[in-house]
Amino acid sequence: MSARSVASPQSSCRFGVAVGDATPPVGIYHRMWGAARHDRSTGVHRPLRTTAMSFAPLGDRGPGEAERLLVAIDQCILGNEELGRIVGSIVERTGLPPECVAISCSHTHAAGLLSLERSRLPGGEFIAPYLDDLARTCGELAARARGDAEPVRIAYGTGRCDLAAHRDYRDAERGGYVVGFDPDGEPDDTVLVARVENLGGAVRATIVNYACHPTTLAWDNTLISPDYPGAMRETVEAASGAPCVFLQGASGELGPREGFVGDVAVADRNGRQLGHAALATLAGTPPAGTRYEYAGVVESGTAIGTWRYARGDESAERQARSWSAWRGDIPLPYRTDLKPLPEVADELQRLERSEAAARAGGDAESAQRFRVLAERCRREFTRRKGLPAGELYPWQVSIWRIGDAVWLCAQGEAYSLLQTELRRRFPKTPIVVASLGFSWDVAYLPPASCYDEPRYQTQVAILAAGALERGIDELAGRLEQLLR
């Protein structure tokens, strides 16, 4: 017998949102790319943004039902110290415990690499004051979002966008993988949107969850920029009249088909492409709080079966209001072939001396080559020096089950297998995947098959082959518990 109604995934909760500017000062250290020849930013393409969202259950709150905060920041990556400043400011302003706060970076590479350890470099004198301002802004926005909260319904829709391309390209002439457009790859093109409406039907926010590295702009760009998420938000906000929030999905092997350029017009074009795909998805998203039901026959040239949207029943509303959450660590194995950290430190010093000597000798080409190698080495040292001791790394994850949907914030840069496999296992559950949550020191999480032949992501990965698959299995078990 054919179904007579189709349920629409919904969430009902209290929600508040606050948006603020997070643009660094012009002249701040900006070099993100080893190939870049500049150190300081020279201007602003589009402002950077920080958005705080407050989620809380409706009615009386039981154990484990504390309010949650999700803060989306236009930054590339955050280290433990930088992240600690932000979370500390939010805790101070809101009184919420740290485990109720999740941070997710958009991963724009045109924000610069604003690590406190780079304060000694040109433009680095601006880094610490900027991070203090960013922490203060995040705390203020979190407090405003909480004060702005009201009962809402959230409707979810799934669409497609071919902005993202597979970026593990095997260069046969070079004899190995490079990071670049792979025309034969099969990227995850899923666009997941969440439309938040208050009980009066007004749109409070639109959340766009998409997996694609914001690497349109690369070494030739000297401007501060959110990359494609900036124009994407502008496109959606012009149509909705409400804030649009971008959440970076699991994009370890995904990037724009046209990227690694210095032309900001390309970044805007990429953003509009995703923005229009999100709007198309929103146009097909059912009204919040409804189900699609069979309404009977109308006799015409033939018998026409009609359908209509109707308000969900009491059981559907109870389901939409259900709430559960988990925040914790999933232990994943370190790889065993990592170079000893003292050797990395010695190599960095050697490369820095070589760069300085080449520059002093007027050999600009050699100086640039040593500069690129030193940058790679510096990142490895910075990333690894604070890693927890032992054989297992505590991969940080936060999961919220809000009604029919799951909101997942995970540490590091997982390959898209993280989201495609979870969505395959839970096909009726919208799963919002926000990557680059917490600190970046875990780096990439590639599938086991990627370790067979070296590529960039496996070279910088600190976890062993199979760690991602193990993490997915653990997450699936947690999701099963929360969905029950």
Image (cartoon, helix red, strand yellow):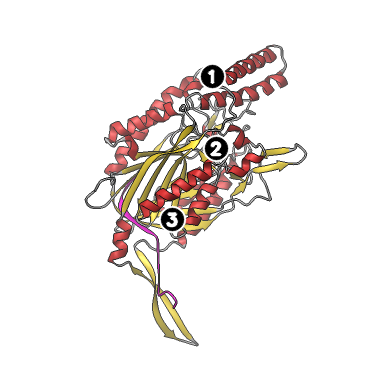
Residue at (58% x, 47% y) in the render: 269
The disc label shown at residue 393, or none:
none
The Cα atoms of the two marked residues, 2 and 1, are separated by 26 Å
Q: Which residue is mark 2?
A: 444
Q: In the image, residue 186 lies at what x, y percent? A: 62, 52
Q: Which residue is mark 1?
A: 121
Residue 274 appears left or right of 23 = right
Disc 3 residue type?
A: Pro
Query: Are circles 2 and 1 on residues that touch, CB within 8 Å?
Result: no
Q: Which quarter of the figure is the N terminus placed in?
A: bottom left
In this view of the protein, can residue 204 be seen by the observer?
A: no
Secondary structure state at the residue bearing disc 3: loop
Return the disc, 3 or 2, that comes first in the chain's sequence.
3
Magenta-colored span? 1-18
Q: Is residue 228 above or below residue 138?
A: below
* The stretch drawn in magenta includes residue 4: yes
